[in-house]
Amino acid sequence: MIPTPDAHAQLVSDDRSCVWHPFTQQQGWAGEEPVIIERGQGTDLFDTAGRRYIDGVSSLWCNVHGHRHPRIDAAVRDQLDKVAHSTMLGLTHPTAIALARRLVDVAPEGLTRCFYSDSGSTATEIAVKMAFQYQRQRGGEGARRTRFIALRDAYHGDTIGSVSVGGIDLFHSTYRPLLFDTLKAEPGDAADMERLFEAHPGEVAAVIMEPLVQGAAGMLVHPPGYLRAVRELCTRHGALLICDEVATGFGRTGRMFACEHEQVAPDLLCVAKGITGGYLPLAATLATEEIYEGFLGEHAEFRTFFHGHTYTGNPLACAAALATLDVFEEERTLERLQPKIELLGLLLDEVAAMPEVAEVRRRGFMTGIQLGDHPVELRMGHRVTLEARRRGAIVRPLGDTVILMPPLAISEADLRGLIAITAEAIGAAVATAQLAVAA
């Protein structure tokens, strides 16, 4: 039901007076007419005025099979008829057990244990804590391994531990006094990482990285073979490898997990976002049996991993995740994605040729369109976002990089429409900005 003008005005008023939006400068937000999403269907979103938008960012990189997918809807309803939530502290439940088995089965070889949490940030925070505690509990030389190597411009979430292993100054520098120090490697440069290992012999507990693509860095794509080289460096120097597949997992690069492209098996794997198809908050940190066994002991030894969340392994979220994996199989999602990946590449070639575009970076369905250097006050990426909305698509910028990551289920027709709208929006945004500067 579309609200009346008075009801819409009340929603806008309440939003501006009560809601604090994430990663949003609220002063600027108050000066714009908000898009209030009222419902979704397939790969479309509809606002309270009934306007349709192509969901060009998968509702922040998490929707996989589309909104209101009947298979996932039914799974959540069925679980709701049983129990909505039960703690996993001292208890368990069938849905979490079944999902852990499925995740272990589809994950890279050697990952045998599943620790649930609620978001990408918590998944990576858990991996960092596991790696640190595992090394401490090994004793001997392991006790010296207290440092982490992360990549420059890394982003692994917004909790303090995940921010500590991050490297985007705009997001992270404010919190520097709260953080622990990490070693920063140049993305894509295996020699630089080897230099860090050699400068700190026996000190590195783990390397944490997004495999193949650094999403929040603006879709920075690593060169072929880099992930494999990092795996080999970790093995040679006795460090664990943490792969953060919160953004890259569940088909975004064309395979279920990005690690598969280079036949790499990490020691810890972090997943979230697409795990439930974009329905409910859920995350998991998968670990090897060796790491798991490092936490076993008598009660008095206190080798327990002292970490947990109220909604860890929530049954509704686990039901949605099981259904999401079912849909991957039943609809042959990854197989059907390959022609769309090829089509996306062809369409983006035309965008890359635009004079307003400096570079297009892409892997699979993950795309960053770099608009070039513009004064910060012009907010060029944001201008593109507004122009795209006027034309019927939701995109989101990272600075002056326009991000596209549509649901894997998007049709070829809508994919063409999304790229056409984005190209038009870029042209219009740059033109209006130039007029504004001239004035």
Image: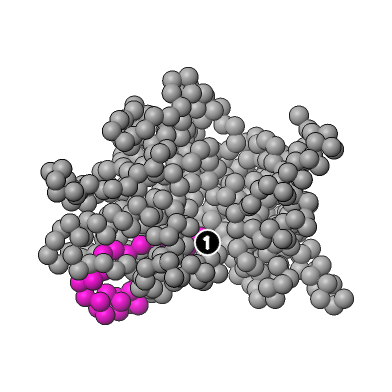
**Residue at position x 12%, y 43% in the image:** 298
Please state, as top left, top right, bottom left or bottom right, where the N terminus lies in the image: top right
Count the marks: how many? 1
- Residue 64, percent across and down? 53, 42
Whether residue 261 is situated above or below residue 150 in the rendered picture: above
Q: Residues within 10 Å of mark 1 (few under 14, many from 20)?
A: some
Q: Is residue 109 visible?
A: no
Residue 121 belongs to the span the image colors magenta: no
Q: Is residue 411 left or right of residue 93?
A: right
Amino acid marked by disc 1 = Ala
Colour convention of the picture: one colour
In the rendered image, residue 381, in percent from the top left (x then y), is placed at: 68, 64
Closer to the camera, 407 or 170?
Answer: 170
Quadrant location of the C terminus in the rendered image: bottom right
Residue at 39 percent across and 29 percent down: it is 86
Measured as percent of width and height from the top left, residue 135 is found at: 21, 60
| Above or below, 396 relative to 55 | below
The magenta-colored residue range is: 190-215
